[in-house]
C-alpha cells in the first residue's frame, strides 16, 4: 500500500520546492517589498532559431496520462564552478531552453510532484508571466501555492493559514521571468543532453541559506518543458513533472491574488 504523505511532510516538501531553504524561512509580505523578476535584455543571439513546432502554441489534444518523473541520481556530482565553460553545442542547447522559456507568456497544465521522501502528489498549475503562478494540489491535500508577481504564498485551506516567501528568493522566478538568457542571467553549472532531454542546472549561493540548485529538463523532440528538480542546501530533491501543457489558454487574473484577509500568516 502506498503511504500517503503526512500533512507536515507535504508542507516541508513545498518549502523545498519554493524556497530551497529550511522550514521557518517564511517572511511577512507586509514587511518586505520584493521586485518582480528582472527580465533579460530583449536582444537575442540570432544563431539559435525556434522551430515552427516550438513557435506554435502548445496544445496536447488528447489528455495525457500522468508521467513518471525522472528522479535524479542523489549521488550525482554537479560541478560548482562559477567559471564553468561550455562548448558550442552546450551553449546552443542552453540558448534553445532560454528561447523557449522566453517565448512563453501563459502556461496551463497538470503536474506530478515527488518529494524528498518519495511521496507523490498531483494537481493543476497556471502561469502568467512575469511573476505569476498558481499550483492547486488534488484532494486530500489542502495546499495551494500562489505568486502574485512579488510575493509567493503557501496556502493551507484546512488550517486557513499561509506562509509568505519573497518570490525573488525562490527558484520559480527563473520560470516566471518575462525573458531570460540562462547563461548570462544565472549561474549555470551544467548543460547536458541525450536522446530525450536537455538538462540545464542552475546553482545559487546565499549567505544565510546555503547553496541550492534548480535543474530544468526540456524535451529534445518537442522542445517543451518536461520537469524541474530543486535541490535544497541539505541536498534533498523535490521533482515536479508537467504534462497536458497548453500555452494558448487564457488565464483568469484572479487566480494569482494572495488573500491576506481570510488567511493568516503564522509568526516565525
Image (cartoon, grey):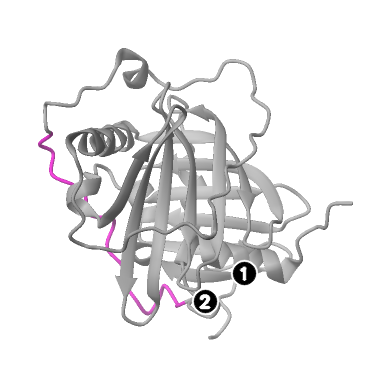
Whether residue 40 is visible: yes
Instruction: Please tell me which residue lies in front, 57 or 48.
Output: 48
* Residue 8 x/y as whole percent: 70, 71
Does the image show residue 171?
A: no
Q: Is residue 96 left or right of residue 169?
A: left
Q: Position of residue 146 (x, y in %)?
A: 51, 55
Q: Residue at x 55, y 68 (%)?
A: 261
**Residue 81 within the segment the image draws in magenta:** no
Q: Position of residue 183 (x, y in %)?
A: 21, 48
Q: Main secondary structure of the magenta part?
A: loop
The answer to whether 136 appears left or right of 247 in the picture is right
Query: Could you say which is closer to the camera, residue 181 or residue 213?
Result: 213
Residue under pointer 2: 22
Q: How far apart in space, not on screen, are marks 2 and 1 (Cα)?
A: 8 Å
Above or below residue 264? Residue 267 is below
Pointer 2 local density, CA inside 10 Å: few below 14, some 14–19, many at least 20: some
Q: Earlier in the sequence, mark 2 or mark 1?
A: 1
In front of the other: 167 or 209 = 209
Query: Which residue is painted at 63% across and 34% down in the image?
Result: 67
Residue 232 screen position, x and y as percent: 48, 67
Residue pointed to by mark 1? 12
Q: Which region is colored magenta?
A: 27-44
Q: Secondary structure at mark 2?
A: loop
Amino acid at each position: 500500500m502506498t503511504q500517503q504523505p503526512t500533512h507536515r511532510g507535504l508542507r516541508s516538501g513545498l518549502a523545498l520546492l519554493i524556497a530551497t531553504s529550511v522550514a521557518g524561512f517564511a517572511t511577512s509580505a507586509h514587511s518586505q517589498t520584493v521586485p518582480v523578476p528582472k527580465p533579460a535584455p530583449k536582444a537575442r543571439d540570432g544563431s539559435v532559431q525556434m522551430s515552427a513546432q516550438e513557435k506554435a502554441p502548445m496544445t496536447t489534444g488528447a489528455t495525457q496520462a500522468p508521467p513518471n518523473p525522472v528522479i535524479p541520481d542523489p549521488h550525482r556530482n554537479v560541478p560548482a564552478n562559477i567559471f564553468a565553460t561550455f562548448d558550442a553545442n552546450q551553449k546552443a542547447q542552453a540558448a534553445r531552453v532560454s528561447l523557449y522559456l522566453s517565448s512563453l507568456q501563459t502556461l496551463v497544465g497538470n503536474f506530478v510532484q515527488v518529494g524528498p521522501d518519495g511521496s507523490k502528489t498531483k494537481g493543476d498549475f497556471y502561469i502568467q508571466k512575469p511573476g505569476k503562478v498558481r499550483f492547486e494540489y488534488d484532494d486530500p491535500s489542502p495546499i495551494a501555492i500562489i505568486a502574485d508577481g512579488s510575493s509567493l504564498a503557501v496556502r493551507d485551506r484546512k488550517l486557513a493559514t499561509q506562509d509568505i516567501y519573497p518570490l525573488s528568493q525562490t527558484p520559480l522566478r527563473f520560470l516566471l521571468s518575462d525573458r531570460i538568457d540562462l547563461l548570462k542571467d544565472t549561474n549555470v553549472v551544467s548543460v547536458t543532453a541525450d536522446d530525450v532531454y536537455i538538462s540545464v542546472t542552475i546553482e545559487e549561493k546565499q549567505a544565510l541559506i546555503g547553496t541550492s540548485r534548480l535543474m530544468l529538463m526540456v524535451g529534445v523532440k518537442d522542445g517543451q518543458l518536461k520537469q524541474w528538480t530543486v535541490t535544497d542546501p541539505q541536498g534533498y530533491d523535490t521533482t515536479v513533472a508537467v504534462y497536458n501543457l497548453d500555452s494558448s489558454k487564457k488565464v483568469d487574473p484572479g487566480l494569482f491574488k494572495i488573500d491576506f484577509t481570510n488567511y493568516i500568516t503564522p509568526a516565525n
